[in-house]
Image: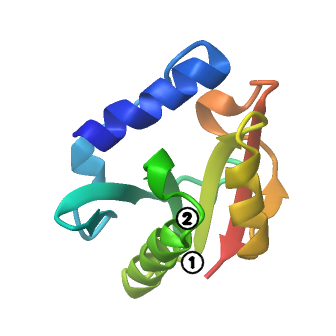
Amino acid sequence: MKLISDIQQVYLDRYGEVDVTPVDPTEFAAPLGHFVVGYVDGVPVACGGWRAHDEDEHPLRPGDAEIKRMYVAEALRGRGLARLVLASLEAAAREAGRKRMVLETGLRQPEAIGLYQANGYARIDNFGVYRHHPESLCFAKDL
């Protein structure tokens, strides 16, 4: 999908490497995941997904849904599309019985940090492959 390659290019430009998180597309299949794509005039311009986490390994806990691959095409940023994708992901996770959204973003993505904080996400300890990454920030929001 072009949007995924576009977001990986953003990571490469900002961090010098692509996102190294292991992601299997089947993790986004219902009922333990969800993925959305937003279109404008038939062209995919925004995307995002969540995958279930049920491990009890601080700071993750059973019932979590991890947001991955949130992205809006650069030409369409600032129009509220990211908020729509985020709201859609939260609603789908809530409907699937998930209790909390968690995510990782980076220090070099101030627009993402602002989006999540403006929508009620609070900092948590880093998790997974980002546990000791100095440029990673992890957030969570109860659903």
Quarter of the view holding residue 106: top right
Q: Residues within 10 Å of mark 2 (few under 14, many from 20)?
A: some
What x and y, as percent, mark residue 73? Answer: 43, 49
Q: Quadrant of residue 60?
A: bottom right
Quadrant where the N terminus sits is: top left
On the image, the x and y values in percent for residue 92 come to 38, 79
The label shown at residue 19 is: none
Left or right: residue 29 versus residue 102 is left
Check disc 1: other Cα within 10 Å, few if <14, some if 14-19, many if 20+: some
Classify mark 1: helix, strand or loop.
Answer: loop
Q: What residue would you read off at disc 1?
A: 99
Residue pictured at 75% horizontal, 24% vertical: 133
Q: Position of residue 80 (x, y in %)?
A: 55, 73
Q: Quadrant of the C terminus?
A: bottom right
Q: Amino acid at mark 1?
A: Lys
Residue 59 in view of the camera:
no
Q: From where the camera sits, is residue 35 visible?
A: yes
In the image, 103 versus 118, the foreground residue is 118
Task: Tell me the residue that label 2 is attached to.
Answer: 62
> Looking at the image, do the residues carrying marks 1 and 2 touch, with CB atoms under 8 Å apart?
yes
Tag 2 secondary structure: loop
- Depth check, front residue: 93 or 61: 93
In x, y percent, where is residue 128? 61, 35
